[in-house]
Amino acid sequence: MNRRGFLATTGIALLSGCTFDGGTGDTSNTETPTDGPTETPPPEEPGVSAEDLRERRVVDFENVELTAAVFGGRTINDRIRAAYGISEPATDDSPAVVDALVRNNNSFEQTFHLRRIPGFWDPPNTHRVTEAGDRGGTVYLAPTENHDLAESVPEVTRDEAGRWRLATSGREWLPETLTLAPDEAIRGEYYLVGSDDPSHEPIGVGRYEFLYQGEGFTVSVWETESPGPTTESEHAGADVHALPNAEEMAWYHEADASTSVYLDPSAERVEAPACIEFELRNRSHDRLSGNPYDWTLFKRVDGEWFRIEPWGIPQPLSYVEPGQSDESSLALYHGDPLACDDGRSVGHLGGGRYAYRVGYSREGETHAALVDLEARAVSPSPDDDVEVERSGEELVVTMPEWDDDEHPPNAEILVSRADEDTEADRQLIPEQLFRRPMRGYRNTLPLFEAGIERITLRADRHVVGRTVGYDELERTVEYEGETFHATGEDPLRE
């Protein structure tokens, strides 16, 4: 739709400095008799909706072996929203087409500077950013004849390599300001093209970010047949079991150039303390769904995986769109961890092989990467604030929760050595005992030195429930080559 023709016929001016007269849209000085109040006709829809653009996220180019995806959006003044999509691939006859939609969801007229809307500043352009962080050639969003605001439409052409570029050097295409009536929307249709300067690289693999104050949209480009890692994993060929509760594993060390979704670590072998950046790259045509707070660090001991952190997560739902990445960081410490505002940190880790898992998937697969950590072994010990009393072969350990009015009723756990042929319900490793849900084990198991057969732990109901369960109140565990039997009491069930 050519919005200029529409605005001329309705009398609505975007740039002339006029405003809507009392909300009626009447800019004439001539009064026209009417039988009733004059109603402003609803704004004409631009032929595309935000829902349409959410379905137009990724296309495979036909003239070159590239795939492009668009993701992101922008909101200003709470109710002015911009959505973006890519509707047509590049062909021998036309460049790729990117659509933008800006809607005023307010109940009143709104005027704002277009430079606040990514893709609508003059001219809309940005540089390519590679995976290594290098900045490359320039890409432009050149308005087409179907752009609602374009004051001029630039010419585009194919270069000798068949890539689409600007054909002219002019860059003044769009106005500076825009006025939108309540619930009015405008559409910006663009060609995605390279610079007219032949010294600038054409559109290639990387990210093209159109941002204003950190918010906006990104065009992500990758090789259609080779979306996966460009280097081989340091753990290539490693044979490891699947992580607990994983139906299908998607290990980074098993990814190759054809892998479209993979979790890429910045390092695979580190010495504590260390921080590793992880990037879950989605170079498929499908969105990934999952929980951005769902992650797990496991340690592999004797061929088995043991959960280290975390032991509880919130449950929001989020997505990783085609072309988008989910980034996270993990700090690993041998001693006490340092809190990270934007990252995850885990302390009290001994050397060995770990696995980091994220909570997004496409068809139920589990994405994870191996990390080898060099560090001294860890040795858990009881909390500093517990009291320990010995009577022959038995210890009595009293936690601060005992006889504390602010905690649930008092409860006890009896932990004793089990017979050698007793089968354990679960095995524990030293790294696990440092975690808060393991306080019952941390304040008992490390105290089983020679001559100690039984330990009574005096705590509260919650400590007992986390240690032996709230239902059966009984558990047998293996720790450091020995087996222990634990039984607890629940005063609320007596």
Image (spheres, rainbow, N blue to C red):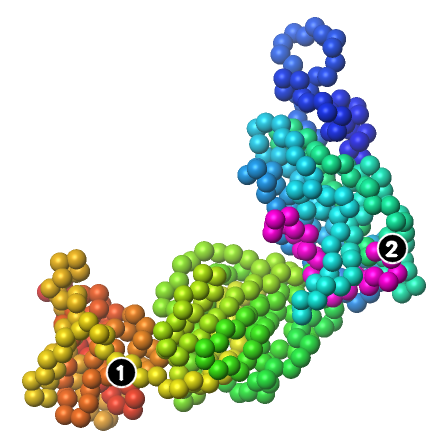
Residue at image position (80%, 44%) is 143
Position of 328 with respect to 439 (left or right) is right
Q: Quadrant of the N terminus?
A: top right
The local secondary structure at tag 1 comes to: strand
Q: Position of residue 101 (x, y in %)?
A: 68, 42
Q: Is residue 404 visible?
A: yes
- In contact (CB < 8 Å): disc 2 and disc 1: no
How busy is the neighbourhood of tag 2: few (under 14 within 10 Å), some, or many (20 plus)? many
User: Which residue is label 2 attached to?
Assistant: 196
Position of 2 with respect to 454 (left or right) is right
Residue at image position (82%, 57%) is 194
Q: Position of residue 81 (x, y in %)?
A: 61, 41
Q: Quadrant of the C terminus?
A: bottom left
Whether 235 is among the magenta residues is: no
The type of residue carrying mark 2 is Asp
The type of residue carrying mark 1 is Val
Q: Position of residue 357 (x, y in %)?
A: 49, 72
The residue range painted magenta reads 195-219
Q: Position of residue 252 (x, y in %)?
A: 58, 77
Counting residues from the start of the chain, the first of labels 2 and 1 encountered is 2
Q: Is residue 55 visible?
A: no
User: Which residue is label 1 attached to?
Assistant: 477
